[in-house]
């Protein structure tokens, strides 16, 4: 049976939506529909976490298992708190290394999702939306460079959040976090990539 570890923050647990509608659970559902035998996702994520807080929780969990694949989506709270890109790069690199270890040292089993742009949402009313977008782009450029240099997958979902960020159907009740409909977009993109890797392992 395949196993899945999801590392992140509110975007991974699916703040304000039922757990079945977050992207890890939707991904598992899609993979099962494709006849992959896969366990429910193991999720280490909490709303508000930064890179260092996620790293600290990973240490506390003392995970001994390895997983068929691992996802990593982190960084929005670093940006929200005004932390430097240099600091993010250092801590994200360490987290990615841990993710690869959890994937049994197989880099191709690690999937990094880009950071959504919360600056387009109703929650950001009155804030400098262009500055938020600029900082999110800088963080995502770092994510992409580090991920691809490590031979891990990088999945772009930021543009979807920008396109749908004013559409209430794609937002949770808080006007900030995604709804299950937006998470479905991410799950489809992730599933396509993961299925390719798991299919290769079948051979």
Image (spheres, rainbow, N blue to C red):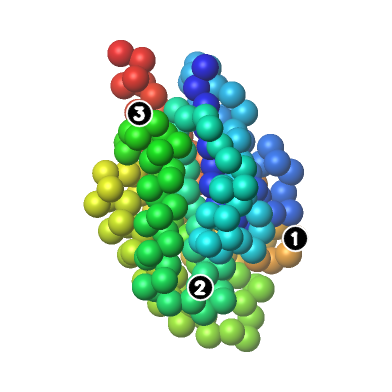
Residue 9 position in % (x across, y down): 59, 55
Q: CA distance from mark 3 to mark 1?
A: 35 Å
Picture quadrant of residue 119: bottom right
**Residue 87 in sight in this render:** yes
Q: Which of pointers 3 and 1 lies earlier in the amino acid sequence? A: 1
Q: Earlier in the sequence, mark 2 or mark 1?
A: 2
Residue found 49% across the figure and 76% down from its top: 83
Q: Position of residue 24 (x, y in %)?
A: 57, 39
Q: Which residue is mark 2?
A: 79
Q: Is residue 110 visible?
A: no
Q: For the residue carrying disc 1, how many other residues have a C-alpha within 10 Å: few (<14), some (14-19), or many (20+)?
A: some
Q: Which residue is mark 1?
A: 173
The CA distance from mark 2 to mark 1 is: 23 Å
Given residues 117 and 6, the one toward you in this image is: 6
Check the image and report above or below for 27 versus 55.
Answer: above
Secondary structure category for the residue under label 2: helix
The residue under label 3 is 197
């Amino acid at each position: 049976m395949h196993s899945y570890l999801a590392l992140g923050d509110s975007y991974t647990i699916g703040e304000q939506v039922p757990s079945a509608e977050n992207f890890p659970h939707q991904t598992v559902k899609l993979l099962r529909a494709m006849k992959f035998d896969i366990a429910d996702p193991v999720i280490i994520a909490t709303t508000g976490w930064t890179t260092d807080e996620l790293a600290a929780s990973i240490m506390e969990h003392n995970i001994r298992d390895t997983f068929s694949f691992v996802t990593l989506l982190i960084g929005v709270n670093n940006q929200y708190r005004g932390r430097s890109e240099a600091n993010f790069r250092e801590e994200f690199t360490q987290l990615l290394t841990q993710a690869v270890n959890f994937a049994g040292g197989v880099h191709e089993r690690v999937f990094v999702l880009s950071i959504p742009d919360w600056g387009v949402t109703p929650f950001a009313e009155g804030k400098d939306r262009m500055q938020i977008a600029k900082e999110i782009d800088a963080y995502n450029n770092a994510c992409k460079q580090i991920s691809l240099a490590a031979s891990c997958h990088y999945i772009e979902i930021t543009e979807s959040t920008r396109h749908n960020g004013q559409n209430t159907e794609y937002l949770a009740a808080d006007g900030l976090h995604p709804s299950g409909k937006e998470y479905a977009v991410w799950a489809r993109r992730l599933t396509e990539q993961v299925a390719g890797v798991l299919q290769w392992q079948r051979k």
